[in-house]
Image (tube, rainbow, N blue to C red):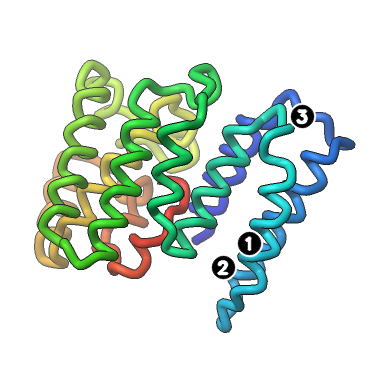
Amino acid sequence: MKKIFIFTLSLSVLFCLNCNSQTKCEEYHTKALEFMNEYFFSDEKDKFYLDSAQFYLDNVIENCEYKDMVILHKLQLLSNQRNYKQALHIIDNNKWDIDTVAAPYFISVLKNRFEAMQLLFNGDTLACNNTIKSIISELDNFLIPHKQEIDSVLKLDEENAMKFPLIYPILQYYYYKFILYTPEEAKKELDVLEKSGVNKDVIDWFLTPEEDDKFLNYGTF
């Protein structure tokens, strides 16, 4: 959970470099995140928190200098409401800032992630897994030209590995791979990685296959 929060914070910083902290956008976005955190870290999962967060996001989303970041949080909220259809509509129709999302694969992976969640929610596990395999393939194609660098980075200590510019897609790649593994397959994969010199602390939050109900909620991947 701590690492997911760090990545969410990092994305927020990335998207908000040019923000005016006094604007209505900043104020409402902050309020929305506070309500979302109340929901995520509460045992009751009171719908009031998500409804309140949605109110603030919807009232500021079109006027934000860092609109894409606000939209990603709106997508996170919609996934917790299981409203994947609306999320996919937003992904398809938003005019994404290529400089903001940074990587050419980002939107495609994002769309496939929500399609996979929708399929799983509807009970179509096979189609969901095939969609996840498409995500893995796309990330693999993006990372292959950097294989030597990546092999070296994964042997570093966690602090230095996290400074590598491509660490986000690397972690996405392992995240989706481990989703498809059984516990036995995950352990076998980890053994192979460790024998090759990979520092397991860099990817230790993917070592246990994710439960379905957790995958149905979009976080940062």
Q: Are marks 1 and 3 in contact (CB under 8 Å)?
A: no
Residue ID for mark 2: 40
Q: What distance separates the C-alpha of mark 1 from that of mark 3? A: 21 Å
Q: Amino acid at mark 2?
A: Phe
Task: Check disc 2: other Cα within 10 Å, few if <14, some if 14-19, many if 20+.
Answer: some
Mark 3 nearby-residue class (10 Å; few <14, some 14–19, many ≥20): some
User: What x and y, as percent, mark residue 5?
Assistant: 56, 53
Which of the 4 image quadrants contains residue 138? top left
Residue at horizontal 73 percent and vertical 32 percent from the top:
63
Q: Amino acid at mark 1?
A: Met
**Residue extending furthest bottom?**
44
Tags 1 and 2 in contact by the CB under 8 Å rule? yes
Q: Amino acid at mark 3?
A: Cys
* Sequence-wise first label, 1 or 3: 3
Label 2: which secondary element: helix
Residue at the image position 42 percent from the left and 63 percent from the top: 82
Question: Callout 3: helix, strand or loop?
Answer: loop
Q: Which mark is residue 19?
A: 3
